[in-house]
Image (spheres, rainbow, N blue to C red):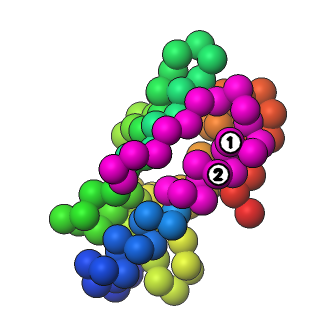
């Protein structure tokens, strides 16, 4: 996995990614409450479960705290143009789509 982003590129890409996720969730799953502030995306389900996705600038990663899968760290793979888990290489998009679709009871897609 190669994360060749400099600090400015990371900040831009992370902000765009978080904003994209927030927008898509709001459009597709209105029952999920989203809040994007200060580089932290908070997603709360109707039953009070909370997903947190935030940028971690020192390591140039996105960090996910999920009530389903626990904690995960994701680095951007330039060759695959995707945020991939630093443990196992699973794409962040797939994990969020799967977990949020179940939580919302409707399909959530980030494509």
| Viewer-nearest residue: 88 or 39 | 39
Q: Does the CB distance between marks 1 and 2 fall below 8 Å?
A: yes
Q: Is residue 46 left or right of residue 105?
A: left
Q: Position of residue 82 (x, y in %)?
A: 54, 71
Secondary structure of residue under mark 1: helix
Q: Which residue is mark 1?
A: 26
Residue under numbered circle 2: 23
Work out whether residue 33 or residue 107 is closer to the camera in this orientation and state it: 33
Residue drawn at x 63%, y 17% as measured from the top left: 46
Q: Can residue 69 be seen by looking at this rendering?
A: no
Real-space Cα separation, disc 1 to disc 2, in angstroms: 5 Å
Write the residue at 54% across / 27% down: 44
Most extreme residue toward the right is 106
Quadrant containing the N terminus is: bottom left
Label total for image: 2
Q: Which residue occupies the extreme left position in the image?
A: 58
Q: Quadrant of the C terminus?
A: bottom right
Q: Residue 49: x percent and y percent?
A: 51, 21
Magenta segment range? 18-39
Q: Residues within 10 Å of mark 1 (few under 14, many from 20)?
A: some
Q: Which quarter of the picture shows residue 74?
A: bottom left
Vertical order, 50 against 13 (above or below): above
Instruction: Verify whether residue 20 appears in magenta.
Output: yes
Instruction: Please say if 34 is above or below 13.
Output: above
SS assignment at label 2: helix
The question of residue 52 being in magenta is answered with no
- Front residue of this view, candidates 14 and 60: 14
């Amino acid at each position: 996995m190669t994360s060749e982003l400099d600090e400015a590129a990371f900040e831009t890409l992370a902000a765009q990614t978080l904003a994209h996720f927030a927008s898509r969730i709001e459009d597709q799953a209105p029952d999920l409450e989203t809040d994007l502030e200060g580089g932290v995306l908070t997603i709360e389900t109707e039953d009070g479960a909370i997903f947190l996705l935030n940028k971690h600038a020192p390591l140039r990663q996105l960090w996910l705290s999920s009530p389903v899968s626990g904690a995960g760290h994701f680095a951007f793979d330039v060759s695959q143009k995707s945020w991939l888990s630093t443990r196992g290489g699973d794409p962040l998009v797939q994990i969020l789509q799967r977990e949020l679709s179940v939580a919302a009871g409707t399909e959530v897609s980030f494509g």
